[in-house]
Image: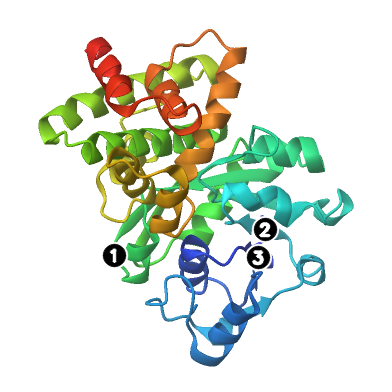
Amino acid sequence: MESTQNVLVIGGGSWATAIVKILTNNLPCVYWWVREPEIKEGVEQHGRNPLYLSTALLNTQKIRIFTSLKEVLAMVDTIILVVPSAYVHLTMKELSIEDLANKNIVSAIKGIVPDTMETITSYMENQFHVSQNNMCVVCGPSHAEEIASDKLTYLTAGSPNAELAEYVAHLFACDYVRVKASPDMKGIEFSVVLKNIYALAGGIFRGAGYGDNLLALFNANCINEMIHFLSIVVPNGQREFCSASYLGDFLVTAYSQYSRNRSFGMMIGRGYSVKSAQLEVKMISEGYYASKCIHEIKKNYPINTPIAEAVYNILYEQAPIRITLSNLLNIMK
């Protein structure tokens, strides 16, 4: 794959800003679309995103930033999607199949499209006819805040197209980022979705007053539930679950101080309403939307996901928190 491809980052949040920072290490020019004019102005004038991850200093000599998506799409070959999953449909609705024809699509989104109940790669395939061989996913364990500080991070680029996975790995690799390629695009994508739900659930336990001893048991059960889900929905006998893209990404989301899902869950566990918790966290908690999507998706498979279902019941059915958590504890191993 040609190394001279033009690359576009779609999204103006913390993770998008961190990715732009990474890419400027390897590309002569990074194209960047943001919705908010104030982000464009802040980056161009001060080299920082004034709304998200403002601690990251950006190399503006290597960045061309746009607020018109149609305008910039014609200039690029590879698109990296980094908008919150809840806004994917809104962001992409003005685009046509022709706009994305022959382009590589890389998803760094950590959720499911709630409008259609699909993973990002399924959404792109069904809505825009993008071939799976032209898609890749990028996952952690990673938090944008540590990327901003140049702290060593390991990522995984997953695609059934080995050449594309290696190309994306090369794009992201720099002094403080190591990247490996994987063929398990769908498995990685679902594990990213599930770990947000489990991190949110762990936050609920923490907010309800439970300690580290219980959370260790709970997280072990989350891992088993994730393995069970993946083995049925995306069977792959060669998957190494005890690696960065599965277990590692789960652990950083479950325990990190930067985890929005954990913080959101803690608010719920303390008695906040969903709306109040969303306002307090101030950024999108992917686990909130993911829990509803997994609730719908699992109806098509012979799987039992009591933890994910408990999160759905608490968030969407107003199930009593104490009773729901107690019922979960009764079935933990």
Task: Provide the secondary structure element on which disc 2 rests.
Answer: strand
x then y, percent, for residue 229: 46, 19
Q: Which of 153 and 219 is in front in this view?
A: 219
How far apart in space, not on screen, are marks 3 and 1 (Cα)? 24 Å
Q: Nearer the viewer, residue 67 or 296?
A: 296
Disc 1 marks a residue whose amino acid type is Lys
Above or below for 148 versus 46: above
Residue under numbered circle 2: 79
Residue under numbered circle 3: 7
x then y, percent, for residue 190: 51, 32
State which tag comes first along the sequence, 2 or 1. Answer: 2
User: Do tag 2 and tag 1 residues touch (Cβ < 8 Å)?
Assistant: no
Residue under numbered circle 1: 151
User: Do tag 3 and tag 2 residues touch (Cβ < 8 Å)?
Assistant: yes
Q: Which residue is drawn at 60% across and 45% down?
A: 136
Q: Which residue is drawn at 54% across and 51% down?
A: 108
